[in-house]
Amino acid sequence: MCINDISMSQLIYTLLLLLLVVATFGKTRACNETCSFTVDYEHDTFLLDGKPFRFVSGSFHYFRALPGSWRHILRSMRAAGLNVVMTYIEWSTHEPKEGIYNWDGIANLEQFIRIAEEENLYVILRPGPYICAERDMGGFPYWLLTKYPNMKLRTSDADYLREVEKWYGVLMPRIKKHLRGQGGPVIMVSIENEYGSFSACDHRYLSFLKNLTESYVQNDAVLFTNDGPELLKCGRIPGVLATLDFGAVDNPDLYWQMLRKYQPRGPLMNAEYYPGWLTHWTEPMARVPVGPVADTLRTMLSSGASVNFYMFFGGTNFGFTAGANDGGPGKFQADITSYDYDAPLDEAGDPTSKYYTLRSVILEYFSDPDVPVPPRLPKMSLPSVKLNRYGSLMSNEARQALGYYTVFSERTVSFEALNQHSGFVLYEATIPSDSNRNALLLKVQGLRDRAYVHIDNKFIGVLSRDTATDSMSVKLGQSKRLQLLVENQGRINYNIANDFKGILGFVTLGGNEILNWTMTGFPLDEYSLLQNYVDRYSGYDVETSRNAAARIFQGTFVIHSQPIHDTYVDPTGWEKGLIFINGFNLGRYWPVAGPQVTLYVPRHILREGINTILVIEYQQEIQGDAIIAFTDQPKLDGLLPFNNFLIQK
């Protein structure tokens, strides 16, 4: 047909129709007759719309990246040859407070699923409800412990089951229309997460969760569990596909043989294949060499297995979302803010050398998706910023502006009992007049996690759970007030142990218990309060707060033109604290502990013109000008002697 033979309106209509056809057949939801995803146990394979199917997938948690970057990251995954993306669903992201649900912005799960589909990726969802994931409380919302202090998470505890049932009643209807059986891209849904590692081994709970999940998913997607090869006894559920989690090993067949003892037939799947690993503060950055990862991947794909990389893109634990583990001297190790994970795509979503190596292996077994690898996005450096001082959280003005509550109690109580998720609680008590005014031993039992010790608003030292330091010698002189500013560094995320925060035991001076406490809460989770405080006390640095911890600083910087690129805040010279840019909580910094030094700043929170940076420095007394820098390079290997540290996982 010649253009001259049709009208312009007909031409436009024809072009639109062609675009619609291309778009439709380019999506994962296209299927000939009945959309389905099932397991063919007899032939040890998955069936997609009735045809044998296997996949190579990558984990990418939508809540660890801003929505403006989702498409770029998902396209980079597809360009690597992946045909599936796997994500956890984090309960605490969607129900941060009881009955208050969030499905917008970084919590827009359905938008994430739609973008994945548009990028020609199938989706695997892992709703937990426990996800671990190096997230605060393993993804559980803290308020469960406020409402039920004695709740036994991940068991058949009646209160727990009731809350899970209520949560699934909100979540699952949102998922259902995206399941493969409904024409959507979601092919699999998990039940729990590595339950075989959990000491409770409560099969009644697993049966409940299976029935609950099945009531929503029905036959529209495949249900599965995942466990370490030696932990299947308590983790697998009869009638549900069992999968394994393991990293680079010389002989994966040994692990498949362990699986076959419990599941004689069915497709082989490594649900968490580790190309990187997690990192805690004070540790060297975990670096996993790519050679063994590529070799094991090739072996698994040669055997016909399906594989999911954990993580393919790690991202960032923004705000107060980073969790902790129960190792180290104090049985507590907080996770760093970055979740770079030494993954194939780095924290900013850019391909690494590991990406290209693994992509070449994947394309030996899967067809080239004909999607160009997106280039590394430019990063920008900015001039250093001079910050103004605005006193301390310890000042009366800050307490009035930022304190959520003041509570009196004979003995100290936890964050959770005070219905507080994050930030600090300031515990204050009068020092008995008959106390020995020379050196006395201060001891804080059950400290969780870090106390900035003050006497009459003067910061004198730190007690810390992670180093098992719960006591110190103090000289009282004429002092009248003991003040313990206690920081929540993140709730334990693995093998959940109801990790309450605050002071859970007795506080003693010279062996005598201190009673009658005043507690003030500083959750620091509403930036508007911080901004109002700074606006009200512009240039304010009250004398009584100059020797205190938790100092507040703010400044501005200007971005003169578009395009705006990602950057990194470099708090070198500062010690430990929290940074907000334009009201967005980037997360915790702690360069003196390392290994992470810089905090990732997504371009999506920046704007042309004036930008605001607010810093709460927990412990360092900043001498002279308070300067903070920006750089175009991440610094995640701050423990310099260990820069080339490699681990095997």
Image: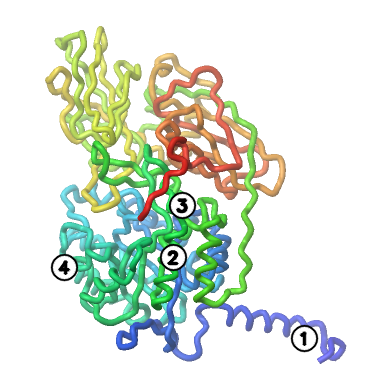
Numbered-mark total: 4
Q: Which colour scheme is used?
A: rainbow
For the residue labelled by badge 1, is the local secondary structure a helix, a strand or a loop?
Answer: helix
Of pointers 2 and 3, the one earlier in the residue sequence: 2
| Element assignment for label 2 | helix
User: Looking at the image, do the residues carrying marks 1 and 2 touch, with CB atoms under 8 Å apart?
Assistant: no
**Mark toward the start of the polypeptide (1 vs 3):** 1
Asked which secondary structure carries label 4, the reply is helix
Category of crowding for the residue at label 2, using alpha-carbon neighbours closer than 10 angstroms: few (below 14), some (14–19), many (at least 20): some
Q: Distance between the residues labelled 2 and 3?
A: 17 Å
Nearest-to-viewer mark from 1 and 4: 4
Q: Using the rendered view, name the quadrant where residue 163 is placed.
A: bottom left
Q: Which of marks 4 and 3 is in front?
A: 3
Residue type at mark 1 is Gln
- What residue is drawn where x is 46% and y is 71%? 84
What residue is rendered at 81% in x and 92% in y? 1
Instruction: Report crowding for label 1: few under 14, some 14 to 19, many 20 or more residues within 10 A (C-alpha).
Output: few
Mark number displayed over residue 203 = 4
**Residue 586 location, x and y as percent?**
48, 42
- The residue where tag 1 is placed is 10
